[in-house]
Image (cartoon, rainbow, N blue to C red):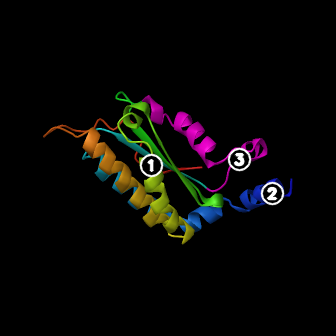
Amino acid sequence: MTNRLLRIARHWWHDEHHLRRRLDAGALARLRARVTASEARHGGEIRVCVEAALPLRALWRGDGPRQRALALFGELGVWNTEANNGVLIYLLLAERAIEIVADRGVARLVPPGHWDAVLAGMRQAFQAGRFEPGLMAAVEAVEAVLVQHFPLAPGQANPNELPDGVAVR
């Protein structure tokens, strides 16, 4: 019970002010530009979502970052691309946790454990408080997979089915 209360307190403490201190408007604009540039190179969709803390109802249920990322994958419509090639990059600041959720069109092409290896490398950046570089590395890692499996033909454009901006919750 004590661990649950400590976790709730940690999330209660993290608010939009904490988020904006770690990722200001400039960082969010650079991330948006990076996603836009990435999507010019492949036919997939990348969606970045950053959340200061979990909602109280999710905390009370005992949800973790993975469960929240899966819920946001649906809420943000990442699952709803024509080729099922959307990928969500989710950062939960209160726990310095990152998750990558790939739609089935991508997931079936990526070997088991690939995303775990990508996440392991990025956790170091987040643990050091380097959130923007960590998210940029996440976009680059997802881009590499999408360029490999969903390349654009010469002259072809990505239809851009999802917003490129960072969803801030």
Callout 1 amino acid: Trp
Dominant SS of magenta comes to: helix
Q: For residue 68, say whether it is visible.
A: yes
Q: Residue furthest front?
A: 112
Q: In x, y percent, where is residue 40? A: 26, 46
Tag 2, which secondary structure?
helix
Instruction: Indicate which disc, 3 or 2, sits on the residue closer to the N terminus.
Output: 2
Q: Nearer the viewer, residue 156 or 26?
A: 156
Q: Which mark is residue 3?
A: 2
| Residue to which mark 3 is pinned | 55
Give neighbour class at mark 3: few <14, some 14-19, many 20+ (Cα, 10 Å).
Answer: some
Q: Is residue 73 magenta?
A: yes
- Counting labels gives 3
Q: Nearer the viewer, residue 79 or 26?
A: 79
Q: Which mark is residue 115?
A: 1
Distance from disc 3 to disc 2, alpha carbons, whole Å, reads 17 Å
Magenta range is: 52-80
